[in-house]
Image (cartoon, rainbow, N blue to C red):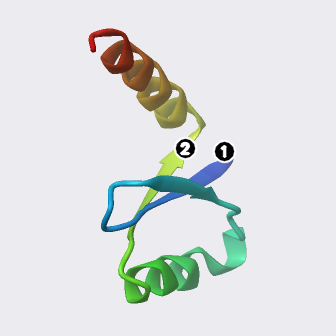
């Protein structure tokens, strides 16, 4: 099992990376949702793919 990354997006569209506690990931997800944010969990490969996609989209502006 690889490393997991938790990203949380607020209502304004700003996202931030949240440090993941593997034993309490479900609780972290619930806490983020309760705070009105949209949490997303990515593994290492997905994180790289999303990062590359983000860079490509920024380059189109």
Mark 2 Cα shell of 10 Å, populated few (<14), some (14-19), many (≥20): few
Q: Nearer the viewer, residue 44 or 34?
A: 34
How far across and down, in percent of the image, does residue 29 sit? 48, 76
Mark 2–mark 1 distance (CA, rounded to whole Å): 7 Å
Q: Secondary structure at mark 1?
A: loop
| Callouts 2 and 1 close, C-beta under 8 Å | yes
The residue sitting at 32% across, 61% down in the picture is: 12
Nearest to the observer: residue 55 or residue 46: 55
Q: Residue at x 44, y 18 (%)?
A: 55
Q: Position of residue 26 (x, y in %)?
A: 52, 79
Query: To which quarter of the image does residue 61 belong?
Result: top left
**Which residue in the protein does label 2 denote?**
43
Q: Picture quarter containing residue 6?
A: bottom right
User: Who comes first in sequence, dot 2 or dot 1?
Assistant: 1
Above or below: residue 12 compared with residue 1 = below
User: Can you say whether 61 is above or below 4 in the image?
Assistant: above
Q: Is residue 33 above or below residue 7?
A: below
| Disc assigned to residue 22 | none
Question: What kind of element bears circle 2?
Answer: strand
Q: Is residue 26 visible?
A: yes
Point 46% across, 19% down: residue:
52
């Amino acid at each position: 099992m690889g490393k997991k990354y938790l990203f949380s997006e607020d209502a304004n569209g700003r996202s931030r990376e949240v440090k993941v506690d593997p034993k309490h990931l479900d609780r972290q997800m619930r806490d983020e949702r309760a705070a009105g944010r949209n949490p997303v969990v990515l593994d290492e490969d997905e994180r790289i793919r999303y990062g590359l996609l983000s860079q490509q989209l920024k380059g189109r502006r």
